[in-house]
Image: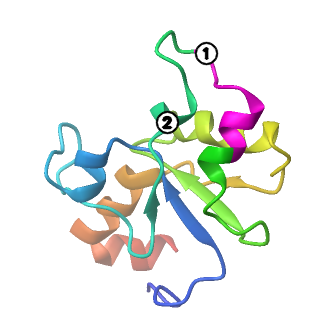
Amino acid sequence: MYSNLENPPWQLIDARDRQRFAGTEEPLDPIAGHIPTAINKPWRGVTRDDGRLKSRDELLFHWQDIPADDRLVNYCGSGVTACVNLFSLHLIGRTDALLYPGSWSDWCAHIIHPQEADVAG
């Protein structure tokens, strides 16, 4: 069911706050944590206190630790705030980055109900 998780052909990027990513806090979903192999890049890291995106140079700095040839797939809790990361990547030229719209809510549902995941997918 979850083939290729140890060495996926993409880099998963979790846009949720660090506490949710670490599994120490989960206000919405029945399971806390993150998808295996994901890295945490909270969406608030690409925005200023007033909600506007940081400058292009600041965004380049924010994303510098991810190799330019990595295939990127962004997710969050439900697919909304990951779009902030996705947009910031687009602004720095990473137009190949993708969104996993089901995000953590979809992923953890398959952990709770693996039989339905096998049937659906």
- Residue 81 drawn at (x, y percent): 50, 34
At a point 61% along the width and 62% down the height, the residue shown is 65
- Residue 91 within the segment the image draws in magenta: no
- Residue 44 drawn at (x, y percent): 46, 31
At a point 38% along the width and 62% down the height, the residue shown is 107
- Residue 6 drawn at (x, y percent): 46, 90
Q: Which residue is mark 1?
A: 52
- Residue 58 within the segment the image draws in magenta: yes
**Label 1 Cα crowd, 10 Å radius (few <14 / some 14-19 / many 20+):** few
Q: Which residue is mark 2?
A: 45
- Residue 25 drawn at (x, y percent): 15, 45
Q: Is residue 25 above or below residue 1?
A: above
Q: Is residue 34 above or below residue 80?
A: below
Q: What is the CA distance from the residue labelled 2 to the residue labelled 1?
A: 11 Å
Q: Secondary structure at mark 1?
A: loop
The part of the image, by quadrant, that contains residue 98 is: bottom right
The part of the image, by quadrant, that contains residue 42 is: top left
The colour mode here is rainbow
Residue 76 or 60: which is nearer the viewer?
A: 60
Per the rendering, the mark at residue 26 is none
| Mark toward the start of the polypeptide (2 vs 1) | 2
Instruction: Tell me which amino acid carries mark 2.
Output: Gly
Q: Secondary structure at mark 2?
A: helix
Magenta region:
52-60
At a point 56% along the width and 48% down the height, the residue shown is 101
Q: Is residue 39 shown left or right of residue 110?
A: right
Q: Is residue 96 shown left or right of residue 23?
A: right
Instruction: Tell me which amino acid carries mark 1.
Output: Arg
At a point 38% along the width and 54% down the height, the residue shown is 104
Residue 15 or 117: which is nearer the viewer?
A: 15
